[in-house]
Each structure stands twice: as structure tokens, then as C-alpha cells.
Image (cartoon, rainbow, N blue to C red):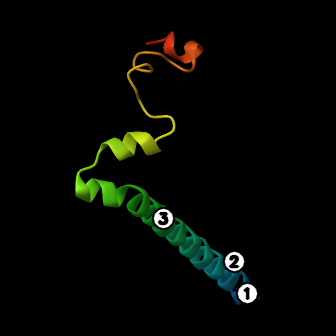
Amino acid sequence: MSTIVLTRSASPSISGEKALNVAARLWFAIAVAGQWMFAYYIAARYGGPALRGDWKVWSDRMSHGQGPSTIGISRWPCVSSWR
């Protein structure tokens, strides 16, 4: 009968694990920074008028918002055909 001896021939590379850890942290930091920039943009653009209750400014600032002439009209007729 033969026996199998398990030996650790090579230790796992720490540089690969460290590179993955650094990449994950960098990705997370960039994602969080992007979310904060978006939140700042929304607050700066629409926060003041919302606090004042000036809702007309919102529709003035929305370049592709809904207006009386665009309600019910689809920009993409091929997409609206399946409704």
C-alpha cells in the first residue's frame, strides 16, 4: 500500500492578494467619490429651488423634461409600438 504525503511546495504569492486588495479599495474609493459628486450636483442644482418651493425652476432646468407639448409623444417610435 502506498501513502500520500502532502507537503506545501510553494507558499501562495502575497503580491497577487495584495494587488487584488489594492484594486478593490481603489475601485470602491472611486465609486464612492462618484456617488458623492452626483449627490452634490443634485443638491446644488435642485436643492435651493426645492427648499424655496420654486418647482418651476426644475422644469426650466430639465432640458428634456415633460412639457405640455411632449406628453404622450414618444421620441423613439419603434419602442413605443410595443406598449
Residue that numbered label 3 is attached to: 35
Q: What amino acid is labelled 2 in the image?
A: Met
From what the image shows, is residue 21 above or below residue 40?
below
At mark 1, the secondary structure is helix
Other-residue count near label 2 (Cα within 10 Å), few / some / many at <14 / 14–19 / ≥20: few
The numbered mark, 3 or 1, whose residue comes first in the sequence reads 1
Residue at x-position 43% and y-position 19%: 69
47 left or right, relative to 30: left
The numbered mark, 1 or 2, whose residue comes first in the sequence reads 2
Other-residue count near label 3 (Cα within 10 Å), few / some / many at <14 / 14–19 / ≥20: few
Q: x and y percent of residue 32 in the render?
A: 50, 70
Label 2, label 3: how many angstroms apart (C-alpha)? 63 Å
The numbered mark, 2 or 3, whose residue comes first in the sequence reads 2
Q: Which mark is residue 15?
A: 1
Q: Quadrant for residue 28, please give it.
A: bottom right
Q: Quadrant for residue 50, please give it.
A: bottom left
23 left or right, relative to 50: right
Label 1, label 2: how many angstroms apart (C-alpha)? 40 Å
Number of on-image labels? 3
Q: Which mark is residue 1?
A: 2
Q: What amino acid is labelled 1 in the image?
A: Ser
Circle nearer the viewer, 3 or 1: 3
44 left or right, relative to 76: left
At mark 2, the secondary structure is loop
From what the image shows, is residue 68 above or below residue 10?
above
